[in-house]
Amino acid sequence: MQFHLQEKSIPRQILMAAAAIVVIVPGAPLLAILVLTQVLNAVLLVPLLVLMLVLARDRSVLGDDASRGAWWALELVGAAIVVTAVAALGVVTFTSLV
């Protein structure tokens, strides 16, 4: 099975060049840029995690390997830990900016 990535409206090279320009600007707050990109990464993680949990439980996708019972409970506990960590990161980040 072979997957082909479709070209996006903004090429990857342009995004990388824009990011490099932002970082090399003299006096740019590099630490704040790093923290905010990690916050964005964490916020985008939550919907992806929910989608993965839904797919893991779907028998039409995984058949007999779909999550059930104790594994499902363990996955929910792990997801709850991740969501709590993301929420704490958001609170700490935004209270430190204010």
Image (tube, rainbow, N blue to C red):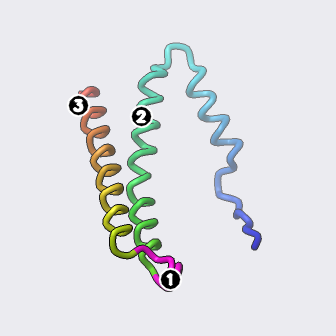
To which residue does mark 2 refer?
36
| Residues at marks 2 and 1, CA–CA distance in whole angstroms | 41 Å
Whether pointer 2 and pointer 1 mark residues with C-beta atoms closer than 8 Å, the reply is no
Q: Crowding near pointer 3: few (<14 within 10 Å), some, many (20+)?
A: few
Residue nearest the viewer, comparing 58 with 69: 69
Image coords of residue 59 (percent x, y): 47, 83
Looking at the rendered image, the quarter that the C terminus falls into is top left
Q: How many marks?
A: 3
Q: Is residue 57 magenta?
A: no
Magenta stretch: dominant secondary structure: helix
| Residues at marks 3 and 2, CA–CA distance in whole angstroms | 13 Å
Q: Residue at x 41, y 67 (%)?
A: 53
Image coords of residue 84 (percent x, y): 27, 48
Image coords of residue 22 (percent x, y): 56, 28
| Magenta-tinted stretch | 59-67
> Extreme right residue here?
2
To which residue does mark 1 refer?
64
Give the residue type that dot 3 points to.
Thr
To which residue does mark 3 refer?
95
Q: Residue at x 46, y 77 (%)?
A: 66
Q: Crowding near pointer 2: few (<14 within 10 Å), some, many (20+)?
A: some
